[in-house]
Image (spheres, helix red, strand yellow):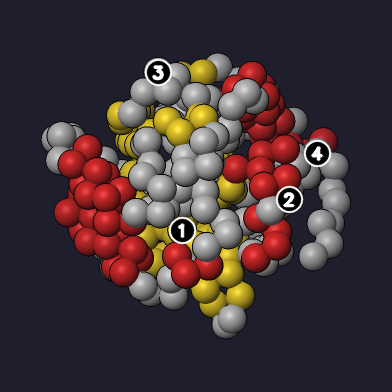
Amino acid sequence: MNIVVLQLDLKWEQPHLNLQKIENLLSGIHTETDLILLPEFFSTGFSVKNVSLAEPMHGPTAIWMQKIAREMNGLVAGTIPIIDQGHCFNRALYVSAEGIIGSYDKRHLFSLGSEHNLYTPGNKNVIVEYKGVKIEPQICYDLRFPVWSRNRYLNSNFAYDVLIYHANWPDPREYVWEQLLIARAIENQAYVVGINRCGKDGEGIGYSAPSMIIDPKGSIIAQMESGKEGILSCNIDLTELKRFREKFFIASDWDNFEVLP
């Protein structure tokens, strides 16, 4: 599976400019792409105090994502502020040419940044299956809570193959970002992708922790330059993942547990 990650210097609360920037970057891709990954709140930046930015589930940004998916012949994924039944959610949308095939609401809202004041937490893990690959979406602060992202092994099957974190992960916690992404890959025997933004947001917060892709052994196999806007492209080998899981089979020893809503 070919994965493309866009590391973006997002314009604060200006969806039109951010979507145009993404289109411009994608226009330079001339190879087959399966999965196009965007940061958390890719259309607005991490603005969690302005609820007027929230869109309905099938609003203009979701329609735009479907257009991009059709043009790129792939799956487009990122998070936007969504209003649904009177509640605001930080929701990851996974959109194909046919429309939304999966969505995930951020479970752990960033209380230090007041996200919990206006947004409602999610309570369900979600698996998105695309081209035979099982993907679990997570969002930014979720990274600090390993129980929530724990892989499962049931009926001779792993719950997911790729764990994805859409983020606006701020300075100065770059070291934490890398270490936790590596830990999630090792403990879950899965590929892990961390997509971060770069630059400074409208509140003067800087972002330099680089986007990266990590294999199930914990090795960083692709990484963006810190603080640089651009595209990261990488092929992940699901055959190698299966081989590794079979050779070093520990899933049957994983602890069984239940996460309460």
In front: mark 2 or mark 3? 2
> Are the two marked residues, 2 and 3, in contact with CB atoms closer than 8 angstroms?
no
Q: Earlier in the sequence, mark 2 or mark 3?
A: 2
In front: mark 2 or mark 4? 2
Residue at x-position 47% and y-position 40%: 201
Badge 3: residue crowd in 10 Å (few <14, some 14–19, many ≥20): some
The quadrant of the picture occupied by the N terminus is: top left
| Real-space CA distance between mark 4 and mark 3, rounded to the nearest whole angstrom | 35 Å
- Viewer can see residue 36: yes
- Reading the image, the residue beneath label 4 is 254
- Reading the image, the residue beneath label 1 is 80
The quadrant of the picture occupied by the C terminus is: bottom right
Q: Which amino acid lies under the numbered mark 2 shown in the image of this protein?
A: Ser
Percent x, y of residue 89: 58, 65
Residue at x-position 59% and y-position 81%: 86
Q: Which amino acid lies under the numbered mark 1 shown in the image of this protein?
A: Ile
Residue at x-position 64% and y-position 64%: 119
- Reading the image, the residue beneath label 3 is 225
In the foreground, 60 or 192: 60
Percent x, y of residue 76: 34, 52
Along the horizontal axis of the image, is 260 left or right of 123?
right
Along the horizontal axis of the image, is 18 left or right of 157?
left
- Reading the image, the residue beneath label 2 is 111
> Under tag 2, what secondary structure?
helix
> Are the two marked residues, 2 and 4, in contact with CB atoms closer than 8 angstroms?
no
